[in-house]
Image (spheres, grey):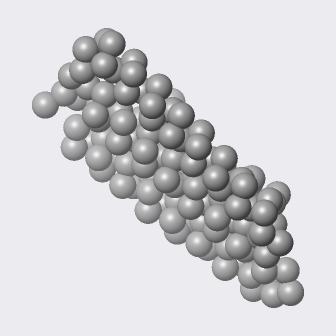
Amino acid sequence: MDDFKAYRWSVTWRSVAIGIGIALFAALIMPDNLPVAWGLLLGFAGSLLRFRFSAGSLMAFAGKSPREAKGYMVRRRFGTYALTGAVLVIAFWREEINQWATVGGLFLTTVVICIDAVLRGRSQPPPVEDS
C-alpha cells in the first residue's frame, strides 16, 4: 500500500511540475494569447483531480463486497464524468479560456503516467496490497 501511495504522489508532483511548466512556457512564448495558458491550467487541474479520485477509489475499493464495490465504483465513475463535463463546460463558456488547450490539459496526467511506465519499463503501477 505504501508503494502505491508513493507512486500516486510521484505522479501527482510530476504532473504539477509539467502542467505549470507548460502553462508558464505558453504564457511567456505567447503573452498576447493567455487563453491557451488558462486552458492548459484548467484542463490540467481537471486531469489531476480525476487521477486523485481514481487512485483514492482504488484504495477504498478493497475489502468491500462485490455488490458494494460495484455501486461504489459506478458512483465514482459518474463523479469523474461530471468533473470532466464541468471542466469542459467552463472552458466553452468562458471566452478567456482556450477550449482546445483545455482538452489537451485533460490528458496531461495520463501522458505523465504513460511516460513513467515507458521509462520505468512497466505497464502497470505498483500493485495495491491489502494491509
Looking at the picture, tell me which residue is in the foreground, 118 or 1.
Answer: 1
Looking at the image, residue 40 lies above or below residue 11 = below
Residue 65 image-quadrant placement: top left
Residue at 63% over, 47% down: 84
Residue 130 image-quadrant placement: top left
The reply to whether residue 125 is visible in this rendering is yes
Looking at the picture, tell me which residue is in the foreground, 85 or 23.
Answer: 85
Residue at 36% over, 47% down: 7
Looking at the picture, tell me which residue is in the foreground, 29 or 92.
Answer: 92
Pinpoint residue 122: horizontal percent, then vertical percent: 47, 32
Residue at 74% over, 81% down: 27
The residue positioned farthest toward the top in the image shown: 66
The reply to whether residue 108 is visible in this rendering is no
Pinpoint residue 14: horizontal percent, then vertical percent: 49, 60
Looking at the image, residue 19 lies above or below residue 60 = below
Residue at 52% over, 54% down: 48
Quarter of the picture containing the N terminus is top left
Quarter of the picture containing the C terminus is top left
The number of numbered discs placed on residues in the rendered structure image is 0
Looking at the image, residue 105 lies above or below residue 3 = below
Pinpoint residue 6: horizontal percent, then vertical percent: 30, 50
Pinpoint residue 51: horizontal percent, then vertical percent: 48, 46
